[in-house]
Image (cartoon, rainbow, N blue to C red):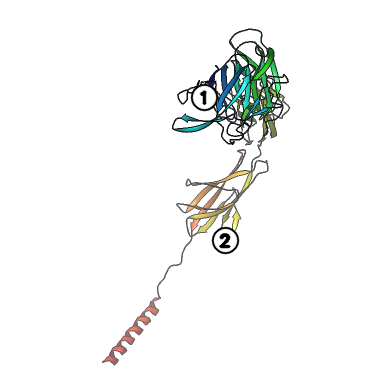
Amino acid sequence: MVILALMCSMSIITLTQSKIEQTSTLPSLDATTRPVFAGGDDDNTTVLVARNDAVFNGSVLRADVPTYSNVTFWYTFVGGDNESAPLLFGDDGTNTPDSLSWVNPTLMTYDNESSVELGLGVKAYYNYTFNLSSSFVSFYARYGEYESPFKIPNLITTGVWLESYFVQEQYTQYEDIEMDIILHDYNISQYGLMYREVESTHSLPFENVTYSLTDEGAQRNVTAAIGNSFDAGTQLEIRSFIVHYDNITSEYRTLTENKVRLVTLVDGNPELTLESERYTNSRDVTIYWEAEAINSNISAVEVDWDDGSGIESANISIPIIIHSYASSGEYNINVTAFSFTGLGSVTDNFTVLIETIAPTGIIQLLNEDGEYIVLNETETFDIVVEKKELQFNVSGTDTGGSGVAKLVIETDEGNIIESPIDAIITIPFLEYGFHFIIFKVYDAAGNEYSFEVYIKMIEKELPTYAGVPFPFGLVTIAGLISIALIYLKKRK
């Protein structure tokens, strides 16, 4: 009798930009749909009724069988046809001439078909019988729903198998990639990881990292690491393996995990954010900085102030650093943050202009003749107006490099008006008479140009009706009376 216990690995890796999700168990298949130990018509077969078809995993079937036993298992196949329904068999661990190999794999076709009651309907199954002449055999469907582009095999084993898990959620280009491996069964002399860069055909050769194992035990946990020499953004395919002494074949054979682990290396260089004024009229310059690194702490922040004073180290617990310059000018400041590993760093820079030269400006007043005249601080200008308002033409100039930021006019009545660099502004007033006006020009560094002008607003006198002179008024009235009398006489 052949007893074949069916197990299905449900571990799925979900890829994000940098995080790896994984489970830690190998659950057995739910036996309520169909008995796991059910056989075929001759009661000498085992049954595979379902499997996890995730692209990163293969099934694990455990077989407790005598040496060189014939094993028959049933399987479903979607996407093929009744003439082929193939399984492609190979064995990574066997090197003898008569054994199965993935270099020259064997294509197995079905023996017969069987209709099996499965839940609400009838489903067709195929079966295949072969001789289990080693501790494990691997296989996968050549095409159809179970074919994996990663060529991840299903595993039929008499008890030896393994599974691996990433030690941490993400890795950078500066870290070794560590994996915990759970080893099952005995006679394991070596273990390790095989890895390759991922490309579209998944055909690059694997490189191996191998460790020796001398202790015995039915199950043990070990750790393996891949020395990192890859750039950030590289995606790697990783599988664990063991070297196992097979009591059936009496030779050392290599068993590869029936999963593929994928990891994308994230950038381990720190992220650095700087904030400071681009223009200032102070020689004391303040920088606000923030820095962080993946899987690491910030070990140092260094500043080159571009004034020949050398490199200054910031206090990494205080995200502010202040420097006093000896003179005005433009400085290209470089800030470098280092991660704790000592391998990752990032440099950012910005330019600051220390400007102490004040801007200049001109304010002109529109007079009653429609002309703009330049005002000054030494005299009061009289202007006749019809309305209580004045119109100005203002402009500013900066020669220090930062540029004019804004123009401001303030009146003695409390009006404050801001304007662009060049503008025409109309300002209303509450009263005629004497007023003083403050005109200011600001540059982007905070320097100010200011002066006062004095204006006397005179109300314009409008013409009034003076009446008709006395003699001419009497003549006009007499004439009108005469005309009225003549008109009435004619009417009679």
Q: Position of residue 326 (x, y in %)?
A: 69, 29
Q: Amino acid at mark 1?
A: Asp
Mark 2–mark 1 CB contact (< 8 Å) = no
Q: Residue furthest front?
A: 42
Of residues 149 and 2, which is closer to you in this image?
2
Q: Quick one: label 1, few (<14), some, or many (20+) residues within 10 Å?
A: few
Name the element at disc 2: loop
Q: CA distance from mark 2 to mark 1?
A: 114 Å
Q: Residue furthest top?
A: 215
Of residues 31 and 386, which is closer to you in this image?
31
Q: Is residue 326 above or below residue 219?
A: below
Q: Closer to the observer: label 2 or label 1?
A: 1
Q: Position of residue 238 (x, y in %)?
A: 65, 24
The quadrant in which residue 104 appears is top right
The quadrant in which residue 293 appears is top right
Q: Position of residue 263 (x, y in %)?
A: 62, 26
Q: Is residue 164 visible?
A: no
Residue, disc 2: 370
The label shown at residue 41 is 1
Name the element at disc 1: loop
Q: Quick one: label 2, few (<14), some, or many (20+) residues within 10 Å?
A: few
Q: Amino acid at mark 2?
A: Gly
Q: Is residue 414 visible?
A: yes
Quadrant where the N terminus lies? top right
Q: Is residue 453 above or below residue 59?
A: below
Q: Is residue 295 above or below residue 396?
A: above
Q: Is residue 350 above or below residue 248?
A: below
Of residues 380 and 158, which is closer to you in this image?
158
Q: Position of residue 175 (x, y in %)?
A: 66, 21
Residue at 63% over, 23% down = 138
